[in-house]
Structure formats: C-alpha cells, structure tokens
Amino acid sequence: MRTYIFVILFCFTFYSFSNLITCHAIEQASTSITDCPNEEHFYERAICIKKKLIQSDNAREKEECFKILMGYWANRDGARGYTLSDIFLELLEADANFFFSQMVKHPNQFDEWLNRLRYLSFTWHQDPPSPLPQKKESILQLLKNYNPEKKELKELKEKLENKLITVVPRQIQ
C-alpha cells in the first residue's frame, strides 16, 4: 500500500513539474512551431502563451508570443483552429488595441479567421443553454466602445463587428 501511494505521489509530482517546465520554457525563450510535436503539447503551450500575452507588460515579448500564435494558425488543423479562435477572442477582450495592432500585420490570417469565426467560436457542442449569444453580445459591446485612432485598426474593428453582427450562434448535439 505504501508503495502504491508513493508511486501515485511521484507521478503527480512529475506531471506537475513537467507542466511548470513547459510554461517556464515559454517565458524564457523564443519558440518555434517545430517545438510542438504533438497535440497535447500544443494545447499546453497555447494556454501558456495566451496567459503571457494577457499578463505581460513587455511589448517585444508580447509580439513574439503573438507571432507564435500566428504560426500555429498558419499550420492549424481542425482542432487547433477552435482553440486558436477562442484565444484570439480572449486576447481581443483583454486588450483590443494590442489585438488589432498585431492582426493588422497579418491581414490574410485575419480574413481567414473572420471567414471561419462562426464555426470555430460560435458553435456550442455541449448541453444547452449555450453561453455563446452572451459572448457575442459582450464582444459587440466591447467593439462598440473601442475607438482606435489609427485608420487600419478601425478598419479591422469594423470588419470584425460586421462579421459578428451576422453570426448566429448554433447548438450541435
């Protein structure tokens, strides 16, 4: 019995330590997409990058993290697209100015994301009620209150706003 408890504690400690190392590595070095060989690692890294983008005050570091996300977007598969789209919306909600100032550097990816937004972030796969109508209204309200000074940021904001107005959240069971 003691051996069993020891093994469980050891495994839990090892797992916790490996997650800490993964997040610490993101904070310490520039990372490339080739550093993420599998899906499980991708999700852990994407969450760490999202947290870093939301919490960091270092502009250069945030730009590098955003570039990593854009690399993931360029090489996404179906499952990664859902995660990345939701991360983009969370970044928008956290700092609209940063989000649009980064997306303006990636106009093709922004347009691709907009074209898939309805399916990637506004399709609910769980039991009703869906929180997506409230999410949509919350983001529309944020966009209504966001008034960028730069013309190119305003254009992206308007494109997103126009797309969201047409999005009807859907429930899949």
Image (tube, grey):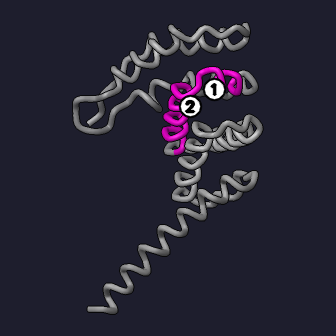
Residues at marks 1 and 2, CA–CA distance in whole angstroms: 6 Å
Say which quarter of the image contains residue 125.
top left
69 and 90: which one is in front? 90
Left or right for 14, reference 148: left
Q: Position of residue 89 (x, y in %)?
A: 51, 29
Q: Main secondary structure of the magenta part?
A: helix
**Outermost residue toward the left?**
128
**Vertical order, 144 against 126 (above or below):** above
Q: Secondary structure at mark 2?
A: helix
Q: Amino acid at mark 1?
A: Phe
Q: Amino acid at mark 2?
A: Leu
Q: Position of residue 65 (x, y in %)?
A: 69, 42
Check residue 159 for magenta coloring: no
Write down the residue under mark 2.
Answer: 91
Q: Position of residue 165 (x, y in %)?
A: 45, 10
| Span shown in magenta | 80-103
Write down the residue under mark 1.
Answer: 99
**Vertical order, 142 against 94 (above or below):** above
Count residues near mark 2 (Cα–Cα under 10 Å), then give few for <14, some for 14-19, many for 20+: many
Q: Are marks 1 and 2 in contact (CB under 8 Å)?
A: yes
Query: In the rendered structure, which disc, 1 or 2, sits on the residue that comes first in sequence?
Result: 2
What residue is rendered at 39% in x and 23% in y? 135
Count residues near mark 1 (Cα–Cα under 10 Å), then give few for <14, some for 14-19, many for 20+: many
